Image: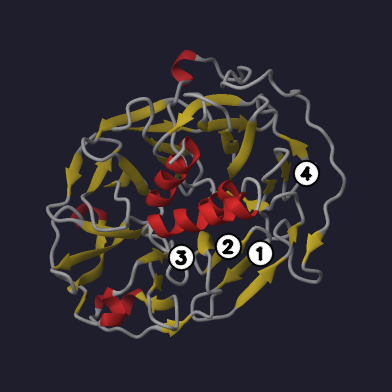
């Protein structure tokens, strides 16, 4: 496994509990699919992952303490690209007649050329050093959090994290090893992993002032969600199996670990966590619990031996905690579930009608998700409703839809 595939496996591991249609949910399965895509087209492996995971799956060695805001990028690579934004030809959106992603307020990035098409404003090229390829972005009120990949020989190859404040120069935040998350208001960035892969650090945006840091010993921490002063973390697992989870309070610094292995399927904006705990091979419980109650694991919620439920490989929770999209190995594919039904111990799935292969990119509202199916194929789906194909620009090697936070 090369450096790129190693990073991709880490990235996919971070999303192993996120819905992917059909049987391609596990990290190993998606890595294998990515390798096949890489054989089909140049950089296919990068494109498959970044379109599925996007910018919310990032990690970094954050070096802002030793660099002033507004410094020129210093990441490894060839001579820096020009710092001036470069105008590009007007892109063609496809399919015709479909609502465009920019009309819905999303930025779009090209997998080649480091081009960004903002939802509002002129197109520009991100001035990354030569050799760096833009692979993801999250727009926040103060600017954009960006991810890139350096395709090179030796230790410099890998993923990097950047911050571009509005109207200011690109800031180099270092290597990406774990993953990152941005708070719903776009004012906090939490980075799991860095030079020391066991560290988790929270930063204020746009100042990049460190708020808190904690060390989580084990296989490497991953950020699962942010809710106010609370951050939900979990250990890394290569196949999406249950692991230890952790609650971390940014104000007090307190870190608590679950007393049983769990899957984390989402964190609401108000601090509730959808978790699954197993008992044996085919039994266990799914419940929505308060973040403060997560460390003490109890068999509450929907407890069942149901094959449909326990063949569920992953899930994704809506920001308001009302709906979950669960991926099963059943012929019907991913299904919508009312969380209130789970809490009441009932299993009443609603067919989603989602494409057979793909993954949730992100929830864009409390009641809609952006679903990636292929490099230029995205859908907007509503719980228990239909999916609408979105028009995306026909950019070289595929389009990446950027998430909005705040």
Q: Quadrant of residue 17?
A: bottom left
Could you tell me how far apart the alpha carbons at marks 3 and 4 are, in whole angstroms?
Answer: 33 Å
Q: Position of residue 97 (x, y in %)?
A: 80, 71
- Indicate which disc, 1 or 2, sits on the residue closer to the N terminus: 2
Q: Which residue is mark 3?
A: 20
- Indicate which disc, 4 or 2, sits on the residue closer to the N terminus: 4
Q: Are marks 1 and 4 in contact (CB under 8 Å)?
A: no
Mark whose residue sits in front, 4 or 2: 2
- Horizontally, residue 387 falls left or right of residue 306, namely right
Residue that appears at 58% across and 80% down: 386
Q: Which residue is mark 4?
A: 121
| Residue extending furthest toward the front | 39
Q: Which residue is mark 2?
A: 372
Q: Relative to 397, does residue 143 appear above or below in the rendering?
A: above
Q: Position of residue 375 (x, y in %)?
A: 65, 58
Tag 2's secondary structure? strand
């Amino acid at each position: 496994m090369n450096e790129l595939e190693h990073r991709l496996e880490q990235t996919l591991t971070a999303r192993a509990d996120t819905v992917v249609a059909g049987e391609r949910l596990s990290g190993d399965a998606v890595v294998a699919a990515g390798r096949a895509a890489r054989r089909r087209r140049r950089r296919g492996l990068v494109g498959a992952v970044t379109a599925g995971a996007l910018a919310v799956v990032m990690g970094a060695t954050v070096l802002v303490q030793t660099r002033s805001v507004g410094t020129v990028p210093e990441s490894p690579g060839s001579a820096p690209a020009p710092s001036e934004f470069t105008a590009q030809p007007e892109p063609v959106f496809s399919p015709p007649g479909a609502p465009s992603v920019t009309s819905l307020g999303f930025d779009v990035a090209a997998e080649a050329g480091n081009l960004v098409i903002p939802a509002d404003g002129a197109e520009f090229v991100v001035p990354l050093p030569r050799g760096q390829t833009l692979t993801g972005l999250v727009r926040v009120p103060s600017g954009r959090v960006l991810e890139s990949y350096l395709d090179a020989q030796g230790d410099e190859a890998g993923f990097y994290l950047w911050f571009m404040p509005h109207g200011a120069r690109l800031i180099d935040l270092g290597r990406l090893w774990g993953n990152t998350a941005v708070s719903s208001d776009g004012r906090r960035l939490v980075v799991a992993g860095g030079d020391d892969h066991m560290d988790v650090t929270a930063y204020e945006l746009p100042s990049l002032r460190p708020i808190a840091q904690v060390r989580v010993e084990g296989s490497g921490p991953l950020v699962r969600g942010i809710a106010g002063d609370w951050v939900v973390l979990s250990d890394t697992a290569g196949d999406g199996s249950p692991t230890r989870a952790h609650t971390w309070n940014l104000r007090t610094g307190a870190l608590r670990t679950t007393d049983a292995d769990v899957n984390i399927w989402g964190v609401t904006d108000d601090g509730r966590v959808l978790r699954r705990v197993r008992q044996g091979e085919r039994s266990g419980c799914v419940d929505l619990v308060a973040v403060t109650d997560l460390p003490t694991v109890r068999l509450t919620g929907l407890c069942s031996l149901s094959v449909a439920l326990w063949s569920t490989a992953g899930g994704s929770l809506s920001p308001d905690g009302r709906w979950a999209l669960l991926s099963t190995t059943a012929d019907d594919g991913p299904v919508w579930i009312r969380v209130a039904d789970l809490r009441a111990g009932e299993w009443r799935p609603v067919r989603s009608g989602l494409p057979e292969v793909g993954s949730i990119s992100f929830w864009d509202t409390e009641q809609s998700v952006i679903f990636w199916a292929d490099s230029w194929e995205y859908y907007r789906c509503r719980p228990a409703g239909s999916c609408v194909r979105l028009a995306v620009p026909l950019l070289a090697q595929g389009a990446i839809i950027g998430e909005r936070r705040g």
